[in-house]
Image (cartoon, rainbow, N blue to C red):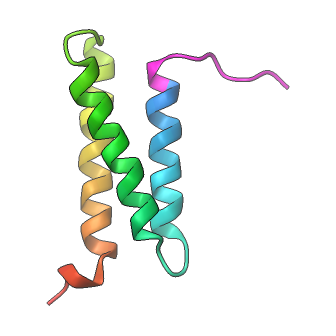
């Protein structure tokens, strides 16, 4: 079995998958999910201007989806 190529896209997807796994656990591990979302946000800030258009779009999409999923999983956000 061959490992995927190491690049920003696979790294973004890996961190995103870890965040989603934390959100999908029962009960959701909100601290770990937030940590991984914050990590993606840090990567967004620190790699800005050094990414391809495709990487920009992927990261923006992942962050949006994860933030929406986090809000839905966080009981303090529900009224």
Q: Position of residue 4 (x, y in %)?
A: 66, 22
When the figure is inspected, residue 27 is found, relative to residue 51, above or below; the finding is: below
Q: Residue at x 31, y 65 (%)?
A: 70
| Main secondary-structure element of the magenta-colored stretch | loop
Instruction: Quarter of the image for the C terminus: give it.
Output: bottom left
Q: Residue at x 62, y 16 (%)?
A: 5
Q: Position of residue 35 (x, y in %)?
A: 39, 53
When the figure is inspected, residue 78 is found, relative to residue 4, above or below; the finding is: below
Please name whichever residue, 76 or 65, is drawn nearer the observer in this view of the structure.
Answer: 76
Q: Is residue 63 left or right of residue 49?
A: right
- Find out whether residue 71 is within the magenta segment: no
Instruction: Quarter of the image for the N terminus: give it.
Output: top right
Q: Position of residue 40 (x, y in %)?
A: 34, 38
Question: How many callouts does the rendering have?
Answer: 0
Q: Is residue 38 left or right of residue 76?
A: right
Please name whichever residue, 1 or 38, is drawn nearer the observer in this view of the structure.
Answer: 38
Q: Is residue 49 left or right of residue 30?
A: left
Q: Residue at x 50, y 29 (%)?
A: 11
Q: Residue furthest bottom?
A: 79
Q: Which residues are magenta?
A: 1-9
When the figure is inspected, residue 22 is found, relative to residue 17, above or below; the finding is: below
Please name whichever residue, 54 or 37, is drawn nearer the observer in this view of the structure.
Answer: 37
Q: Is residue 75 left or right of residue 25?
A: left
């Amino acid at each position: 079995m061959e490992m995927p190529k190491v690049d920003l896209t696979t790294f973004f997807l890996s961190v995103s998958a870890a965040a989603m796994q934390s959100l999908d656990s029962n009960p959701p591990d909100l601290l770990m999910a937030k940590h991984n979302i914050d990590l993606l946000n840090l990567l967004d800030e620190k790699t800005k201007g050094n990414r391809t258009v495709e990487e920009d779009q992927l990261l923006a999409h992942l962050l949006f989806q994860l933030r929406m999923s986090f809000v839905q999983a966080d009981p303090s956000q529900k009224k």
